[in-house]
Image (cartoon, rainbow, N blue to C red):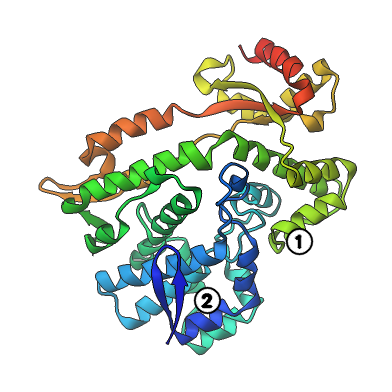
Amino acid sequence: MKQILDTIHGHIKIDNITKELIDTNEFQRLRNIKQLGFANFVYPGANHTRFEHSIGVMHISEQMANNIKLDQDQTKSTKCAALLHDINHGPFSHTSEHIIKKHTGKSHENVLDKIHQSEIYNILTDNGIDAKTIEEHIHGKHDISQILSSEIDADKMDYLARDSHYTGIVAGTFDYQYLIQHMELKDHHLIVDDRALKTAEQLLMARFWMNISVYYHHASKIADAMCIRGIDEMIKTNYIHPDEITNMVDMELILSMQQGPSNTKQIANRLINRNLFKRAFESSHNNIKQSIDFVSSHKTKLENEIAYEADIDPFNIIIDDSTYKNVKEMKALIETEDGYLPLNEASQVVKSMTDVHDKSSKLSIYCPDEYKSKVNSIACNIFK
């Protein structure tokens, strides 16, 4: 049996089916897709990829499967699902996900087509694994699928540990090994024993800190928004089909932008040189006149209005109405003396942090630096 020396988990054993899957073109492609998109603009060490993350998730999944005593076939299918859960990610990971889903209706978790169209299907079939079961595990359809898709799962444990390591955010660390040892599958739910309550709190705190410091850092969000604007422009002008983007790696997307319409060339060159748009306006959702739902549904109209008033190309005005995603981890079930309780009820610490987290989302407007002052004045008149 071969081994891989991983930065986070140390030596990871690789059995025959795992090696075959890793050696496929579809999995090797993940070497060229950054885990954190443009986070390396802020944290230079954040150059890790979906490749090593997927291997790490497979490793943790096997540990969890052994701990809850799955049989050999269940463990095998769970490990394969963990390894393949990100093979459908587009370039720069979550950066391109929303725009790809907008135009294709598919998320990165819809892996079945990619499996059927590749040698992965034959590898799974030859080893007695149903391809459809793999996608069902990724979507959390079965009890044992919670290892990979639930409130506290192998995916979250690996990306928090890995992202924390490569960004250097010490507050993102927690003892995931202790957590694994105190998780059980009971009454169709993956349960955390109350002895590991403090460790579960650490995981939540790690997630909150990573959200604030990394995942929603303003420079990363600006780069994401610029990249999305470039992708959307290429699709709208029929320069590229959305399905083509799904199969690209990071640099292929940047090269396509460089060779595309003039506006996307500008975006590509800015991203290559880290010449980002600037924040012209920012306000919490509670401090603007309109509801965030109104802003979301009228975004293009509002961008055009600001651009018209500022006498600039609407392409150079980006309204970012993104909000912090719901933190599923706070609903993880803790086994207490009073029965099963969601983590945010079992822990006052988590409840307090959740309240602060939910109020942290902001509306931002980005534009080239030279228009920043003018756009700020116009935006204040519209939103304040």
Gap between marks 2 and 1 measured at Cα: 23 Å
* Image position, residue 170 (x, y; %): 39, 45
Report crowding for label 1: few under 14, some 14 to 19, many 20 or more residues within 10 A (C-alpha). few
Residue at the (50%, 48%) spot, across then down: 167
Residue 279 vertical placement versus 329 (above, below): above
Residue 376 in sight from this viewpoint: yes
Quadrant of the image containing the C terminus: top right
Q: What element does badge 1 sit on? A: helix
* Image position, residue 17 (x, y; %): 49, 84
Residue 242 in sight from this viewpoint: no
Under mark 1, the amino acid is Glu
Q: What element does badge 2 sit on? A: helix
Residue at the (44%, 65%) spot, across then down: 57
Which of the 4 image quadrants contains residue 110? bottom right
Which of the 4 image quadrants contains residue 177? bottom left
* Image position, residue 333 (x, y; %): 26, 50
Report crowding for label 2: few under 14, some 14 to 19, many 20 or more residues within 10 A (C-alpha). many
Residue at the (44%, 66%) spot, across then down: 56
- Residue beneath label 1, please? 244
The one of 97 and 258 positioned closer to us in this rendering: 258
Left/right placement of residue 320 relative to residue 128 reads: right
Q: How many marks?
A: 2
The one of 41 and 380 positioned closer to us in this rendering: 41
* Image position, residue 33 (x, y; %): 63, 60
Left/right placement of residue 384 relative to residue 134 reads: right
- Residue beneath label 2, please? 131
Under mark 2, the amino acid is Ala
The one of 41 and 88 positioned closer to us in this rendering: 41
If you read the primary sequence from the N terminus, does the residue marked by circle 2 or circle 1 appear first? 2
